Image (cartoon, grey):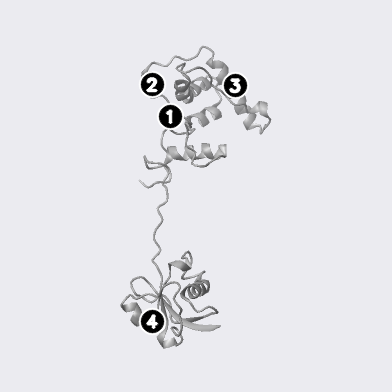
Amino acid sequence: MARKWFQLVGERGSDVTSVAAVSVDIEDVDAFRDAVKAKYEDSHLAGIAAADLTVFANRAAYNVKQALEEDSPIGSFGGLEEDALIVQVPTPRPVAMPTFVWKAPKSLVGSIGANWDFQNSLNIGNLSYAIGQHYQAWTKGKTDKRSHPLFVCSGGPGTGKSRLLDELPNVLRQQVGVQGDPAMNELLRNAYTYKVTFENGTTDNRGISDPSKMIGTRMLYQLYRSVGRLGEGG
């Protein structure tokens, strides 16, 4: 194996390390970069890929920015400590992360019906009673299916399903408040409301087939800072 001397420098030419050496059994730039990465993978090169390192034959070649090609043989380069190979390390770039803040959900109704006076159902009290029973089961740690049923709103087009769902948080706060359970009232007053839809242009799941991920992605989209698609900058 050949011993090769090198020194890490930053993109602006400042020294990152003193001169050091690695041993390589294949004397080309690709194998040399892998060896350099392995030597400093937990320190100076953490999070930096070997392929992102730029290798120069010596300081003179670096000064004129004449880099070696990936498949170039190293040959005699780096054989002497005083004439070490120069390895330029890229400056880590900050990664833009999505920003999420609480935003109230948009209305599910986009027609004129969104502005009509809402008329409560005559039997809405039945629903509020069921919610109360659901809450009591939750406080007691009951997990059987009968203790946490799904509430389903069904009907034909234009019958007010979306409007009812838009109004449901307020309806529940008003109706459940009559029951007088302070703890449940407090939970409902401070609850975060998410509106998840699979229609009106939101049916593209981008390869996601897990229902929980489909729903979770749409919940995050409600909180996403950008008006563009989730995953794009903005």
Question: Which residue is disc 1 drawn over?
Answer: 200
Query: Residue type at mark 2?
Result: Ala
Question: Which residue is disc 3 drawn over?
Answer: 130
Mark closest to the chain's N terminus, 1 or 2: 2
Which dot, 4 or 3, sits closer to the camera? 4
Query: Residue type at mark 4?
Result: Asn
Percent coordinates x, y for residue 14 in the rendering: 35, 75
Query: Residue type at mark 1?
Result: Asn
Question: Which residue is disc 4 drawn over?
Answer: 58
Q: Is residue 226 above or below residue 124?
A: below
Percent coordinates x, y for residue 21 in the rendering: 49, 82
Mark closest to the chain's N terminus, 1 or 4: 4
Mark closest to the chain's N terminus, 3 or 2: 2
Q: Residue furthest top?
A: 122
Which dot, 1 or 3, sits closer to the camera? 1
Q: Is residue 21 above or below residue 92?
A: below
Percent coordinates x, y for residue 166 in the rendering: 45, 24
Q: Depth check: 147 or 160 in front?
A: 160
Mark 3: secondary structure: helix
Mark closest to the chain's N terminus, 4 or 2: 4
Mark 1–mark 4 Cα distance, whole angstroms, equals 61 Å
